[in-house]
Image (tube, helix red, strand yellow):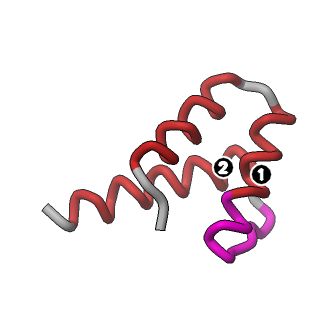
């Protein structure tokens, strides 16, 4: 449901270490995917999205 370009944007946001930017992006990703995060923080949620994307992308090869 997300593209490689979107994953790259997520990675850059995480690397920026700007909590407000990470929070806004986390909310946007949650809306886009129709999911909500539980107790974990925004950065953890985004890292999970990137990790899951990488896993499923490799499964398609």
Dot 2 falls on a residue whose secondary structure is helix
Q: Which residues are magenta?
A: 29-39
Residue drawn at 57 percent across, 29 percent down: 12
Are the residues tagged 2 and 1 within 8 Å (C-beta)? Answer: yes
* Image label count: 2
In the displayed structure, 10 sits above or below 34; it is above
Q: Position of residue 18 (x, y in %)?
A: 78, 26
Please tell me the numbered disc located at residue 41.
Answer: 1
Q: Which residue is mark 2?
A: 44
Residue farthest to the top, as pictured? 16
In the displayed structure, 32 sits above or below 6; it is below
Using the rendered view, name the quadrant where residue 15 is placed. top right
Question: Image quadrant for the C terminus?
Answer: bottom left
Q: Position of residue 51 (x, y in %)?
A: 44, 52
Residue farthest to the left, as pictured? 61
Q: Is residue 1 left or right of residue 20?
A: left
Q: Is residue 5 magenta?
A: no
Q: Is residue 35 magenta?
A: yes
Residue drawn at 81 percent across, 46 percent down: 24
Q: Position of residue 23 (x, y in %)?
A: 81, 45
In the displayed structure, 16 sits above or below 27; it is above
């Amino acid at each position: 449901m997300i593209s490689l370009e979107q994953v790259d944007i997520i990675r850059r946001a995480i690397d920026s270490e700007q909590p407000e930017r990470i929070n806004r992006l986390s909310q946007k990703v949650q809306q886009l995917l129709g999911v909500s995060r539980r107790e974990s923080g925004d950065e953890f949620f985004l890292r999970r999205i990137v990790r899951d994307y990488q896993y499923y992308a490799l499964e398609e090869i």
